[in-house]
Structure formats: structure tokens, C-alpha cells
Amino acid sequence: MMSKTNQQVSTFRVHPSLAIIKYWGKQDSVNNLPATPSLAFNLHGLYTETSVTLTDAQDRVLVNDQLADPPRYHQFFDNLRHVLGQDVHFDAISTNNFPTSAGLASSASGFAALTCACVKAAGAFLSPETLSGLARLGSASAARSLFGGFTLLPAGAEHAEQIFPEDHWPDLRVLIVQVAKEKKSISSRNAMEQTRLTSPYYTQWVASSQNLVQDAIAALEVRDLDRLGPIVRLSTMRMFGSMLGAEPPIVYWLPSSLVILRMCEDLRQKGISAWETMDAGPQVKILCEASDVATIESTIQDILPEATVLHSQPGGPPEEVAL
Ligand code: DP6
């Protein structure tokens, strides 16, 4: 039992992880190991902030003042206690400064922040790789949020790794076009299982991801957006292709998402390098160079005035917040 005098509060801020090569499908659902490799960077300016206190009561997680779904957290907390070698429980309060469960990777920043804050509250110091592996059990994309810069989570891997630092590509920008604020109709966890179990295209999707990730790393290394963009687009569209083949089909897009995808195509024809990607939700993220941000943003405002546009770029690792 914890005595009150031992109680610690720890608070961390962590960015969500935007995949440019997508994780979609599990090699091992029990241990939450990904079937596809994913390549990503943290989104600067967007974050989850999580405070954890040790408690004598049951584990509890509040996300934006709502009690989070307990079964999702059981295995995560049990594994954490096992690795820490401590019989402690955790009380977590978490808030996002961006829409939750709307295809903006809130589970990535959420589980990464929860991991960092729980470990610190328990008085332990673990390597980023170990923290990444702990976060992965909660959400595989969270394994990537543990690192700043560009990260790789290989297929079947227990933890992510940084492949390029945060300042590798200073001119890279991402515009996040929020076409809707509601929660998604089906969680990415359920949707990717449904795809794996029922889509005839799933096997091809998994096989093709391996080549895409190698090509994307080569383009990233030389900071060539016109080489990287088409690969990002392929990974996105092949992931959605696998979902469309699921039974029942999974469709996250809204008409307004498609308006933005078409806009990117038109901009490219005019020589502006705007490369779209999407995740488990209707929002569209556009990769571009800093010098094209103003033109792309004004085009979005002209054709979809109701959309909110967030500006981001590759962000850093988790940060502890001194309260
Ligand atoms: C489309 O990491 O949320 O954003 O491991 O089941 O929690 P679980 O899935 P999650 O899936 C993210 C899927 C994605 C693509 C990506 O971030 O790579």
C-alpha cells in the first residue's frame, strides 16, 4: 500500500505522431505488434498533457473530463506494474489541445504521455526504447510518439526508433485540415481488425508496405518532397483500399475530405508541392514546404471556408511539465 507521504504527481506533454507510411493491421493482437512498418513524425503544437498520481484505489484515466474505457487500459497498467516491479495503481488526468478520437492520433500522444507520467510518478527511470515498448501495448502508434524527429516502427517491432532528428528537415510543414470535429464512427483498433479478418486486399497491403517504407526513408534522407509525396500518397490510398475491401466496408472520408484531396491534385498541377495523407478519420493532412504554406492555406479557405487549418511541423520528444 502507498502511504500518502510517498505520493508523487508527474505531468508530461507529448505530441501525436503523424504517419507518412501507415501502420494498419496487427501481426499479434495480444501483444499489439504491428503487421506493417510505419514511418512518422510528431506534430509540433498539438499535444496531450497527462498528470498521474499514485493511488491506493483502482487505476483510473480521465480524458478531457470523461472516464476512459477501462478494458483498453487493463493490460497496459498490468504490464507497467510488472516492468516497474511495483504493486502501485495510477490515477491519470489527460487533456488534448486538439480534437480527440477524430483521426488526429490522440491515442498515440495519449498512451505515450500516460506511460511517461506513470513511470515518473512511480519514481523509475527507463530508456526511451523501454518507454516506447510500454506505450505500444496501449496503442502501437504511441510507440512512435516517444521520440522527437522522424521515427520508424518496424513490422513486428516492440519499440520505435528515431531515424532522423527533429531539425533534419527545417522547411517541412504540415497543414492539418479539420473538416469535422465529431468522434470517428469506428475506432482504428476495431477497424484494422475488421480489415485484417475480412478484406481480401489485406495481405497485399501488408506486403506492399515493406517496399514503400524503404523508398520513403531514402526520400526523407535527401529531403525531397516531390519524391516522398507520391510514396506517402500511395501508403495512404493502399491503406484505405484495404479498408474498402473489408466486410462491411470501412469509410472514414467525408465529401469535404475529397474536396481537399482534389485540391492537392490541382495545386500539384500548378507546380505547388502539396501532398495529402489521411488516417482513421475525415481530416486531411497536407505535407508541403514552408514557402508554399500561405498559398495552400488561402486555397483551402477559398474552397472550404468552414474548415479549420492547423499548422504544424516535425516536433520534439515528450516533455515533463513542472507544475
Ligand atoms: C491510421 O495506433 O490507434 O493512425 O495500436 O490499435 O491502438 P492501436 O491503433 P492505433 O492506429 C493508428 C492507425 C493510423 C496509422 C498510423 O498512425 O500509423
Image (cartoon, grey):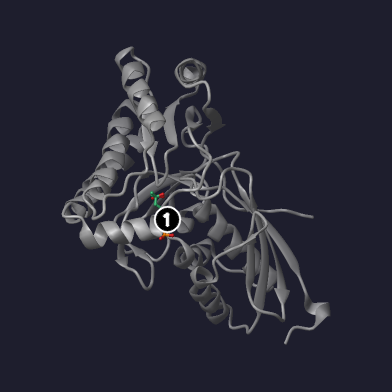
Residue depicted at 79% across the width and 78% down the height: 6
Q: Position of residue 193 (x, y in %)?
A: 31, 61
Q: Residue furthest bottom?
A: 1
Q: In this view, does 240 lie above or below 30?
A: above
* The residue at label 1 has a CB less than 8 Å from ligand 1: yes
Q: Residue furthest top?
A: 270
Q: Can residue 287 be seen in this view?
A: yes
Q: How many labels does the image show?
A: 1
Q: Say whether residue 118 is left or right of residue 274.
A: right
Residue occupied by mark 1 = 187
Q: Position of residue 286 (x, y in %)?
A: 42, 30
Residue type marked 1:
Ser
Q: Residues within 10 Å of mark 1 (few under 14, many from 20)?
A: some
Residue depicted at 49% across the width and 27% down the height: 171
Q: In this view, does 296 lie above or below 202?
A: above
Task: Provide the secondary structure element on which disc 1 rests.
Answer: loop
Q: Where is residue 219 in the image (x, y as percent from the top left)?
A: 32, 35
Residue depicted at 60% across the width and 46% down the height: 47
Residue depicted at 45% across the width and 68% down the height: 137
For the C terminus, give its image quadrant. Answer: bottom right
Q: Say whether residue 128 is left or right of residue 163.
A: right
**Towards the viewer: 99 or 321:** 99
Q: Is residue 229 above or below residue 192?
A: above
The picture quadrant for ligand 1 comes to: bottom left
**Towards the viewer: 292 or 263:** 263
For the N terminus, give its image quadrant. Answer: bottom right
Q: In this view, does 147 lie above or below 168?
A: below
Q: Position of residue 295 (x, y in %)?
A: 48, 15
Q: Can residue 223 be seen in this view?
A: no
